[in-house]
């Protein structure tokens, strides 16, 4: 299922202090691709197979927004077991067949940057690169473009947020789309149109919402469903199915709409949630 992760690249005060001129930042981003292989975060396809990772495509969006696609290649597994190897062990491999050479697997993700706020939204519709790999690419991207990405933080919620956001989502016109609960010896899964379903209402009211492991909501906007979900065992990512046919601008707009719901549930800006302490950037101490 397509997933979304939210990463705050730096403390808001640090980011604001470092990014005073958006046009200058955009120019540095445009220039880093043309650095003749000196860029740390741009993909070098000539690197050793099984170690390659980085940004391979970029696009500036409306306002201070920017999109980048990354790719990550996993190490080659020498113990990869192919059909041909199994057949060979039992002397069943035809003479004209060769054992294939192990190859690395690769995965990709789309990064949506809000350069004004210092937030990166990581979207993937397949197996996502590890968070550590994404953080490493973002760190290198910061070095390439002079941006403070050293102390980035992943948005992670507390369990009780599911209960709060359920109430807020319903108030905002969302309907439940999918719920899953683990009730010790019984697992409950419900999916579909829950509205005006008396049987579902009796089940829902008999189970504490705090016991749901996964919950997803849907709202139709301009004839298109906006769906998002949360899972207790994946507190650093959100589910956003059916987002793949949208343009980058439309995807960004839906991501922002979901963020607003999260912030209503949190009771604060998501940047403040990730960086709750107030600080004074060190550059302020050198001003006359």
Image (cartoon, grey):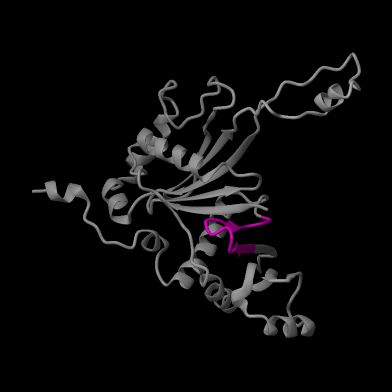
Looking at the rendering, the stretch of residues picked out in magenta corresponds to 227-242
The residue lying at 62 percent from left, 74 percent from top is 211
Describe residue 107's horizontal placement relative to residue 263 as left or right.
right
Residues 202 and 222: in front is: 202
Residue 272's spot in the image, x, y percent? 36, 62
232 to 195, vertically: above or below: above
241 to 287, vertically: above or below: below
Describe residue 243's horizontal placement relative to residue 275 as left or right.
right
Q: Do we see residue 173 in this rendering?
A: no
The residue lying at 55 percent from left, 56 percent from top is 237
Q: Identify the image quadrant of residue 136.
A: top left
Magenta-span inclusion, residue 209? no
Residues 15 and 154: in front is: 154
Q: Do we see residue 26 in this rendering?
A: yes
The residue lying at 62 percent from left, 38 percent from top is 107
Residue 265's spot in the image, x, y percent? 48, 72
Residue at the far front: name it: 90
Magenta-span inclusion, residue 230? yes
Residues 221 and 117: in front is: 117
Residue 171's spot in the image, x, y percent? 57, 79
Residues 273 and 74: in front is: 74
69 to 198, vertically: above or below: above
Q: Identify the image quadrant of residue 209.
A: bottom right
Residue 204's spot in the image, x, y percent? 70, 81
Q: Identify the image quadrant of residue 85.
A: top right
């Amino acid at each position: 299922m397509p997933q979304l992760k939210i990463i705050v690249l730096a403390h808001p005060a640090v980011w604001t202090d470092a990014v005073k001129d958006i046009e200058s930042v955009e120019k540095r981003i445009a220039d880093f691709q043309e650095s003749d292989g000196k860029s740390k975060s741009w993909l070098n396809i000539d690197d050793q197979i099984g170690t390659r990772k980085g940004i391979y495509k970029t696009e500036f969006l409306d306002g201070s927004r920017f999109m980048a696609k990354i790719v990550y290649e996993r190490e080659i597994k020498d113990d990869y077991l192919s059909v041909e190897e199994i057949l060979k062990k039992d002397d069943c491999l035809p003479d004209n067949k060769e054992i294939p050479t192990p190859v690395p697997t690769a995965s990709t993700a789309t990064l949506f940057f809000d350069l004004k706020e210092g937030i990166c939204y990581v979207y993937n519709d397949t197996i996502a690169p590890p968070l550590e790999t994404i953080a490493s690419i973002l760190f290198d991207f910061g070095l390439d473009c002079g941006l403070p990405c050293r102390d980035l933080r992943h948005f992670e919620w507390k369990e009780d947020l599911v209960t709060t956001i359920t109430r807020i989502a319903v108030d905002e016109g969302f309907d439940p789309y999918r719920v899953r609960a683990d009730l010790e010896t019984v697992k409950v899964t419900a999916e579909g149109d829950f509205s005006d379903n008396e049987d579902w209402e009796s089940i829902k009211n008999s189970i504490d919402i705090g016991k749901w492991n996964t919950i997803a909501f849907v709202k139709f906007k301009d004839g298109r469903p906006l769906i998002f979900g949360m899972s207790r065992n994946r507190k650093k990512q959100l589910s956003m199915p059916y987002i793949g046919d949208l343009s980058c601008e439309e995807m960004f707009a839906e991501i922002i709409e979901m963020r607003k719901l999260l912030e209503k549930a949190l009771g604060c800006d998501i940047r403040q949630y990730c960086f709750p302490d107030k600080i004074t950037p060190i550059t302020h101490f050198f001003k006359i």
